[in-house]
Amino acid sequence: MPSSVEIGQAILSGLLLGGAYAVLSAGFSLTWGVTKVINLSHTVFALVGSYIAFWLLRFLGVEPILSLVIIIPLLFLCGLAMHGIIKQTAKRAKEITPASLVLTFGLFIVTENILLITCKADPRLITTSYSGKALFLDKVALPISSLISFALAAVTIAALYLFLHYTYTGKAVQAVWQDKAGAMLSGIDTSRVTAITYGVALASAGVGGVCMGLIYAIDPTIHLSWLIFIFLVTVLGGVGSIIGAAIAGLLMGLVIGLTGAFLPYAWVNLVLFISLIILLLVRPQGLFQR
Amino acid sequence: MMKKLKSGDPKLIVPTVVIAFLFLFPLMKPSIYFLSFLFTLFTYIALSESWNLIGGYAGYLSFGHVAFFGVGAYTTALLLIHFGLSPFYTCFFGGILAAILAAIFGYPCLRLRGGYFAIASFCMALAMPVITRNLDITGAATGLWMSMLPFNIFTNRMIFYEVMLTIALIVVLVVRHIEGTKLGLGLKAIGEDEETAEIVGINTTKLKMTAFVASAFVAGIVGGIYAYYRTYIHPSIVFDVFMTLIIVYMAFFGGCKSWWGPVIGAAVITIVNEALTAFLGMPGELARIVFGLTLMLVIIFMPEGIIFFIRKRRAPKKGGFASQPKV
């Protein structure tokens, strides 16, 4: 049996990790909810974000948080471009969900291999001045980089929530999600709104990538494991719900932390996959969906 | 489309010649490389065609096909190592085990629609390597070694070539037959609109289960033979996530609502892939980028697959000037 300090450590590091998963999932959940597109390339763009942060730090000594000034607009533009492609597909395809799965898988392969060529397959760690340092809560260590990642995640989630609920564009995004025809009838330019949705989604993915990069080492193929986790978070939180994604992300971080304390690491993923399948069967609409 | 072909039909000549040529091809003493390449091609044809039953006709995008393939591979490997049974017989046993897994997974999960089924099956495909990598009986992370057939390498490859050609041929013919039966039409109806299919009295649950279990059975058999061909299996080879995605892609590329779509898709993609890496000497990453780009272009411009794209182009325009009713 693990001791109480170990359990405390597992819970806290789980929660800190959960924040990063929450912000990674929020954008994915949003595009899935608004346009019925399951974007398999979501996390590979997040990884692009973490690599930009890594290289800026390596060559120019830019703090990962400051590098967001570049990452967010860049990935926003990527999102707009991606929306263009998806719009083209939607024109000809009978159903957008399966077509988008194949399309974004293509994008996934292309981006992953571009990363492999440009960044090589070595695992990289974003090493800042505060890496390896930690605050101590009794005997439980809280690494400063994880705390920063968590704060970043919390701010991003809050910003997304405020955007969706308190701005005109955000409300339009929600309107398109709820009823596309209705939104069109009330004079909303749905194409523009979905384009912005993709931009926001990928920009938040970039932030998520930086959050993950602060906690874990990154390599060009790691995004697949992130993708599996954000599937789980999205389904758990309910598709399209930002608050759901936030709670589900924390919950899953907790589950990962705790199963990691009791089981060998390799089995943690198995527990997650099986719990996802069971969850899909019991409540496919997610735990927090109205 | 599905006209019954009689034995004297001139339409049968071309396929018969092609198939006979393929069967007799090893007699021409081709290089081992070509035999291995064609073996891979037939493997993909069989896998993609069997996936087509559930993923194409019924529209249930299963990303778990490789799980069944891997189960077949591990079954025959273990039976060969521990009991000395030849995979050529035990591959059926592997198929049955894969079918049982499909039934256990499919019974609850085939109720899920659209993206949710895709995700659940993807999770199953990802869970399998975790299990095999951590169990001692499956060789854990070191994998399993099998003894080769006691012949020289050419004869060896030739045997596998003929076996896989036979399997692929049977699968293609069976799927072609199914397309015209009640099962095939029912699956197509499910793919078009499941609610309506249910309302008009199609037992959708039974049809989906049949298709899913049958496709898993084929994947299990193919996996069993493939394992013996490789003589070494490892979770990252037989449960390769990339493989599960490429099977789906082949069916989509060719056109997944038709029996010959996956055949065309598998053939074109395997050949293009090989040409990019082996003949043009492109590094693997660059080849994959080209590969990903073609995948995107295909789905953007021909979302229904290449054969439907061509068929639409070639179809005579209906309601032309001559056929206009005179008023």
Image (tube, rainbow, N blue to C red):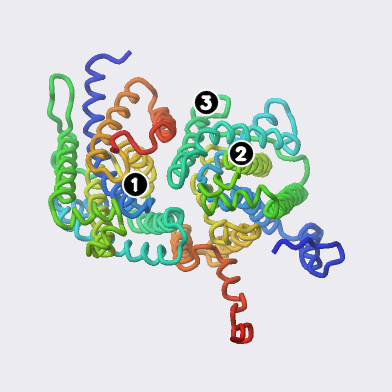
Residue on which disc 1 sits: A219
Q: In which quadrant of the rendered view does residue B79 lie?
A: top right
- Amino acid residing under circle 3: Leu
Residue A278 vs residue A126: left or right? right
Circle 2: residue type: Lys
Query: What residue type is disc 1 on?
Result: Asp
The residue at which mark 2 appears reads as B206
Proximity of marks 1 and 2: CB atoms separated by less than 8 Å:
no
Quadrant hosting residue B208: top right
User: Residue B70, percent across and down?
Assistant: 58, 38
Do marks 3 and 2 both belong to one polypeptide chain? yes
Residue furthest out toward the front: B327
Q: CA distance from mark 1 to mark 2?
A: 44 Å
Of all chains, the one bearing label 3 is B
Evaluate if marks 1 and 3 touch, with contact meaning CB atoms under 8 Å apart.
no
Is circle 1 on the same chain as circle 3?
no
Q: Callout 2: helix, strand or loop?
A: helix
Q: Residues within 10 Å of mark 1 (few under 14, many from 20)?
A: many
Q: Residue at x 53, y 62 (%)?
A: B304
Place residue A266 in its image quadrant.
top left
Residue B39 locus on image (x, y percent): 68, 53
Of all chains, the one bearing label 2 is B
